[in-house]
């Protein structure tokens, strides 16, 4: 049994949905569970709906354009008489009902933003049926159970495993289509964090003991750098789980960071394949040792560097560090790189305005705080003389860190 995951970019138009069906048809002898993301940039658009709603601004226009976007795709795929129209309409009606509820921001966010995946999965599964595929739609929220950390749900693995095992029976007869990114706690939808569909694929694969997971992408495989930034980037034929996990930790967006662990723990290989050209070999991530990997370069944008300086000529000590870490931990903020000196402690985090404001508010009571935003963290794993020279000499380096295998520089712009 295999898990296939298709991202939003792949299914951003009707041609993409057709391509998904073609890929499934070419694997018809196999048992497959299909996970889909929301179509195109729907998640961003739904985020704007929630944002506008919360701020008392017009959210209807955005919602209408999301409706039209899906409607246009459906017109290309279905007859007017298809069941799909009613199902998608109900999903939109549900979204609107959520918007009247007036609940806390993160909870509301999850109820509304999750609809992108619900709608895309309805469209894909209904299209499979028109193509003569024995397909069945599953609601991932009945299977993936989480706590109620809205927008960043923590999976309840034992409950999820129990629920998912019920799927084994159906998958013998049918191709199953479900949503990435979403689960539930009690009766409420909880999302697993932005770009979490890969993680959903890993969760289902782990619980079902799948033989492999394939993530279909708009790149030829996992590359040693983002080809949009470095045109001479190369594709890996294979990568060890460990290397792939570290890459995602540093910010490589090719796979969601939480994806590798559940797969590595059960030794389930992860394939990254090209959606437009499935005959390309892609990359296999599995348990293996590779002796010399080329430098692996990861760019992480939208970083914020915070420096906390003691004000009274004492030195930075463990107690002060512990105060800072406590604040970070309570606000659920992850440090991407850190450095300390006699009188100051600096750390780099993802810039999320609301969280950073709360953090500054807390630590400014004890320290003189400086911060810069709009930074890029560049990590070079397995650096060599050429890459080390190149990245350390970049203009605007604010912080640099070098270990035996990894170079990190934080730069402006
Ligand atoms: N649709 C969600 C997002 O854009 C999940 C995903 O694409 O993996 O973050
Ligand atoms: Mg995505």
Image (cartoon, grey):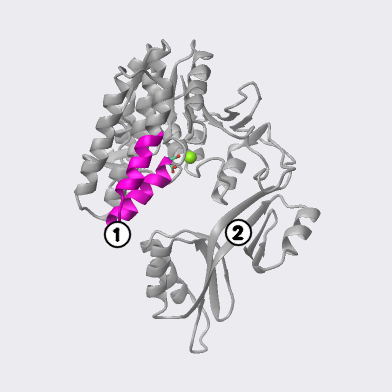
Identify the residue position indicated by label 1 in the image: 55
> In the rendered view of the protein, which quadrant contains the C terminus?
bottom right
Q: Is residue 396 above or below residue 153?
A: below
Above or below 35: residue 411: below
Location of residue 280 in the rendering, given as x and y in whole percent from the top left corner: 66, 24
**Is residue 304 in the magenta section?**
no
Give how far across and how far down residue 282 sits, in percent.
Answer: 64, 29
Badge 1, how many Cα within 10 Å: few under 14, some, many 20+? Answer: few
Q: Are marks 1 and 2 in contact (CB under 8 Å)?
A: no
Q: Residue at x 57, y 56 (%)?
A: 301
Residue at the extreme left of the image, as rendered: 101
Looking at the image, which residue is at 28% across and 26% down? 87
Rendering coords of residue 83 (x, y %): 29, 19
Q: Nearer the viewer, mark 1 or mark 2?
A: 1
- Helix, strand or loop for disc 2: strand
Left or right? Give the position of 198 relative to 236.
left
Exactly how many numbered labels are in the figure? 2
Q: Quadrant of residue 406?
A: bottom right
* Secondary structure character of the magenta stretch overall: helix
Query: Residue at the spot x=39%, y=26% of the render?
Result: 74
Residue 355 visible in rendering: yes
Q: Closer to the camera, 393 or 68?
A: 68
- Does residue 61 belong to the magenta stretch? yes
On screen, residue 131 above or below 333: above
Residue stretch in magenta? 42-69
Name the secondary structure under disc 1.
loop
Query: Observer-nearest residue: 220 or 88?
Result: 88
| Residue depicted at x 49% and y 21% | 18
Q: Residues within 10 Å of mark 2 (few under 14, many from 20)?
A: many
Quadrant containing ligand 1: top left
Earlier-in-chain disc, 1 versus 2: 1
Drawn side of residue 211 relative to residue 386, left or right = left
């Amino acid at each position: 049994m295999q898990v296939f995951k298709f991202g939003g970019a792949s299914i951003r138009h009707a041609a993409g949905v057709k391509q998904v069906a073609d890929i499934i048809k070419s694997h018809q002898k196999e048992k497959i569970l299909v996970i889909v993301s929301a179509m195109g940039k729907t998640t961003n658009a739904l985020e704007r709906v929630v944002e506008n709603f919360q701020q008392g601004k017009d959210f209807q226009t955005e919602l209408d354009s999301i409706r039209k976007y899906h409607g246009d795709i459906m017109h290309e795929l279905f007859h007017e008489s298809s069941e799909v129209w009613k199902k998608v309409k109900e999903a939109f009606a549900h979204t609107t009902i959520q918007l009247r509820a007036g609940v806390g921001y993160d909870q509301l966010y999850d109820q509304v933003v999750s609809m992108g995946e619900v709608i895309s999965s309805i469209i894909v599964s209904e299209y499979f049926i028109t193509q003569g595929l024995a397909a069945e739609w599953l609601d991932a929220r009945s299977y993936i159970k989480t706590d109620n950390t809205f927008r960043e749900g923590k999976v309840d693995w034992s409950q999820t495993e129990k629920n998912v095992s019920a799927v084994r029976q159906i998958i013998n007869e049918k191709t199953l289509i479900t949503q990435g990114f979403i689960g539930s706690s009690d009766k409420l939808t909880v999302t697993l964090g932005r770009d979490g569909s890969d993680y959903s694929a890993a969760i289902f694969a782990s619980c079902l003991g799948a033989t492999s997971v394939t993530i279909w992408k708009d790149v030829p495989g996992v590359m040693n750098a983002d080809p949009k930034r470095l045109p001479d980037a190369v594709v890996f034929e294979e990568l060890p789980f460990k290397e792939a996990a570290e890459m995602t930790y540093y910010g490589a967006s090719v796979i969601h960071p939480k994806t590798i662990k559940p797969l590595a723990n059960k030794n389930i290989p992860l394939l990254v394949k090209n959606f437009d050209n499935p005959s390309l070999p892609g990359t296999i991530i599995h348990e293996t040792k590779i002796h010399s990997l080329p430098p692996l370069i990861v760019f992480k944008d939208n970083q914020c560097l915070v420096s906390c300086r003691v004000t009274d000529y004492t030195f930075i000590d463990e107690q002060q560090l512990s105060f800072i870490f406590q604040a970070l931990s309570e606000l659920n903020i992850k440090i991407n790189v850190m450095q300390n000196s006699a009188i100051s402690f600096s750390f780099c985090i993802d810039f999320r305005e609301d969280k950073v404001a709360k953090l500054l508010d807390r630590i400014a009571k004890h320290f003189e705080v400086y911060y810069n935003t709009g930074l890029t963290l560049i990590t070079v794993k397995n650096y060599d003389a050429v890459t080390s020279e190149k990245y350390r000499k970049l203009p605007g380096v604010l912080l640099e860190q070098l270990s035996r295998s990894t170079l990190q520089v934080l730069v402006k712009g």
